[in-house]
Amino acid sequence: MLSSTTLSLSNFQPKLARRFPSPVTNTTIPPSLSLSNARTTQPDPPPPERKQLKGSPQLKRWSRARTIRSGRKLDRPVHGPETALTGNSPPPVQSEHPLVAVSDSLAGSDDLDNVDSSATAKAIYMVSDGTGWTAEHSVNAALGQFDYCLVDHGCPVNTHLFSGIDDVERLMEIVKQAAKEGAMLVYTLADPSMAEAARNACRLWGVPSTDILGPITEAIAAHLEVSPSGLPRGAPGRNPLTEEYFRRIEAIEFTIKQDDGALPQNLNKADIVLTGVSRTGKTPLSIYLAQKGYKVANVPIVMGVELPHTLFQVDQRKVFGLTINPIVLLTIRRARAKSLGFNDEVRSNYSEMDYVREELECAGKIFAQNPSWPVIEVTGKAIEETAAVVLRLYHDRKRKCLMPRISKRY
């Protein structure tokens, strides 16, 4: 870290007195005398001022995050005219962590607000006796309600997932650490004794906690009038290789083989068929649906290329069209072209606005000729949101439900 020593005018008074003797015993230096004027009396030229390096905000955030996790407080540098004119300012604090030293030397006065927000970041501990999928997604869904103040907007949050916690000793260590950091504890523990131990420990050490799995398990047990097993998924005695598991694996393998219009003769074997122009999210949406056990095929719409006849021969209730805003599509395609190494000079019509609009119009005409295909606008939607719309329409059309739903039998 670049350290600096604060200089005051009092350091120069003895030297000035020896150079310019005066009959007056109490010599005072006028306030107008500056540091540069005092240095002109010295024979040696002043050392060149070292230029302060300006680092990237990403490096600053990483170093601050590591400092917070290590349990140390961030040193807030003091900048102001008072420290330069007085000799009572404390010496700069040297940090023992190398990344913290780099962060302190790179941080300027305009970065103080970011330091304060990172130092006050709240921690959320997620504890699970399984993979932690339920706890992680529940917390992420809840944090979505606080987008307006997360990250750099005043209430940063750090989440920590602890999966496979199946003994009380490890659970107690996590609760103790949460108490030290002032963290919140969220847990999904299928074993009632483990859940009770977590609840009692959090109450004892004053850790705010939430049981995600317990209340809903008790409610279902009361509704079914049976007792839960209390065993987490993958525990001895429970076979994770169920029929549903193998059905999901088969769906993923099928979807990968059917990607981007491959093997059109197998479209009749698909549960869902997606079609749309390039970069409308057909492939990631297909993979997401396949992980839920649906066999998905996707067929691209390209101007000048005829669509396979089997697309119009399969059950039209399982065909879905995808469309997107042309400006957003242009941005996505240009980013894709840049990732492939194409520069502005070697840009194809693939990422030109006129071609994008023309291609979307072509797709719109195909959708109009097939009114039984639902057309889903994917602009600004996450993959999960689009998948929810597809599945709701798929089940509604398959079962002809009066109320929109996604039905599944266990």
Image: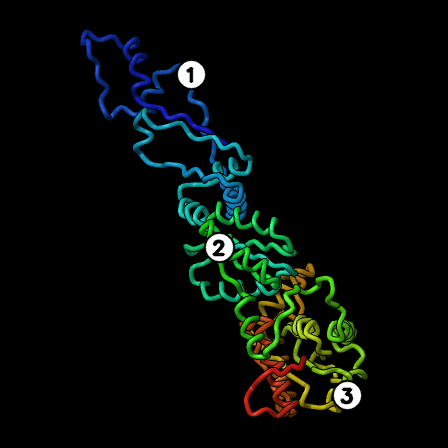
Q: Say which element carries label 2.
A: strand
Q: Nearer the viewer, residue 223 or 390?
A: 223
Q: Is residue 109 left or right of residue 166?
A: left
Q: Residues within 10 Å of mark 3 (few under 14, many from 20)?
A: few
Question: In the image, 270: left or right of 46?
Answer: right
Q: Is residue 157 above or below residue 86?
A: below
Across and down, in percent, residue 16 comes to: 29, 13
Residue 200 x %, y %:
50, 55
How crowded pointer 1 is (Cα within 10 Å; few <14, some 14-19, many 20+) is rated as few
Look at the image and tell me in which quarter the C terminus lies.
bottom right
Residue at 51% x, 38% y is: 100
Please name the residue that numbered disc 3 is placed on. Answer: 310
Front-lying residue, 47 or 139: 139
Q: Residue at x 45, y 63 (%)?
A: 146
- Identify residue for label 1: 44
How many numbered markers are drawn? 3
Q: Mark 2 highlights which residue?
A: 184
Judge left or right: residue 132 versus residue 107. right
Q: Secondary structure at mark 3?
A: helix
Measured along the vertical axis of the image, is residue 303 above or below residue 164? below
Instruction: Tell me if residue 136 can be seen.
Output: no
